[in-house]
Image: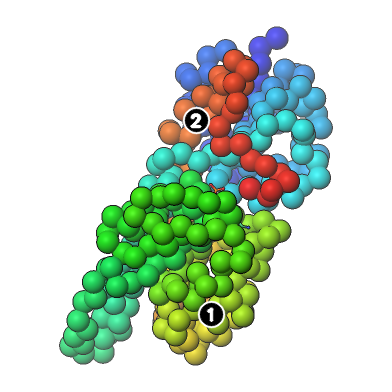
Amino acid sequence: MTPTLVFYSQFDSFEAWRDLLSPLLPQVRIRQAADVDDADSVLYALAWKPPEGFFTRYRNLKLLVNLGAGVDSLVGRDDLPAIPITRVSDPDMGRMMASYVLFAVLRYARDIPAFERAQRERRWHYLHPRLPGSIRVGVLGLGELGACAARELARQGFDVRGWSRSPKRLEGVTCVDGMPRLDDFIAASDILVTMLPLTPETRGLLSAERLALLPPGACFINVSRGAIVDQRALTEALTSRRIAEATLDVFDREPLPPEDPLWQLDNVLITPHLASVAIPESAARQIADNIGRLERGETVRHQVSPARGY
Ligand code: NDP
């Protein structure tokens, strides 16, 4: 029996993934779910938001790879097989995310939105540049993507602090951990960047009360998941300019509806959930490597814990 990898995604190109994975996995057939004729030969699944009950057909499944870094749509399901679940998260994805975050932070650190507004009014608006070391950037979440972004920000000389669940050590970054440290962390962030996964613990974490802890005039960047933040409270804080600026790549509803008040705010930069994407060329190598590890009886990398939620 030739082992099969079943592919499911309504967003990603099957042909692109097949062409990349086939040379790396010459012993494995790569098939779209609709083209699998022998469900028992399916040992691996590469899937993004498969329909309810998708896994029941594949009773010999040994590895499930989530086709993306965010697993919130997967871990909450009650039909997950009890097998290792991994996600795609490669160094290229980290670099892409870090460049987005760096762009957003530098834009605020160099007062670019103020110059954009002044230019529209033909107004010469001199603001003396601040030293990066005088700007406190708080990064919530120091995982694969958050740590990469925090390091890049530290390289630029910002006063970078990071917050995670477990203790971390990152060169150039002051790391704190745990819920009891969160409020002080927020209160000491001139620019707050959200890079947390959406889990039962982080849903609504940035409530109206917590957003109110930000120093007046702080900037806010969300590149992880919209539901981590109370979007209505954020909109109010931005409207009153208590939060001066925001860069938002993710929202509690996507696409952001045309009637949403955030669209009208000139202190908000909106991008359509693309801060980072899975890059098939490097992710395919990671997937093939994990299948090799599984077959050799080694621990797979980038494993997801459904109980923990990420
Ligand atoms: P990881 O799972 O590698 O890291 C998550 C980080 O968040 C870890 O540092 C973890 O702490 C921390 N964390 C999780 N829960 C808590 C908690 N309750 N309290 C404190 N810290 C917590 O994720 P990635 O870095 O790979 O990705 C982060 C998120 O980015 C993804 O979950 C996804 O939602 C989003 N994303 C967005 C994209 C976009 O285009 N906008 C693209 C890709 C991903 P610890 O280290 O202690 O476990």
Q: Residue at x 24, y 75 (%)?
A: 130
Q: Secondary structure at mark 1?
A: loop
Q: Quadrant of the N terminus?
A: top right
The answer to whether any part of residue 179 appears in the image is yes
Residue 267 position within the rendered picture, expressed as x and y whole percent measured from the top left: 41, 80
Horizontal and vertical percent for residue 178?
59, 60
| Residue at horizontal 53 percent and vertical 51 percent from the top | 167
Q: Which mark is residue 305?
A: none
Label 2 Cα neighbours within 10 Å, binned few <14 / some 14-19 / many ≥20: some
Label 2 is placed on what type of residue?
Gln
Q: Mark 1 vs mark 2: give the one in front.
A: 1
Q: Is residue 76 above or below residue 14?
A: below
Check the image and report above or below for 122 versus 65. Answer: below
Q: What is the CA distance from the residue labelled 1 to the residue labelled 2? A: 40 Å
Looking at the image, residue 53 lies above or below residue 243: above
Q: Is residue 78 left or right of residue 28?
A: right
Question: Ligand 1 closer than 8 Å to the CB at disc 2?
Answer: no
Q: Which mark is residue 213?
A: 1
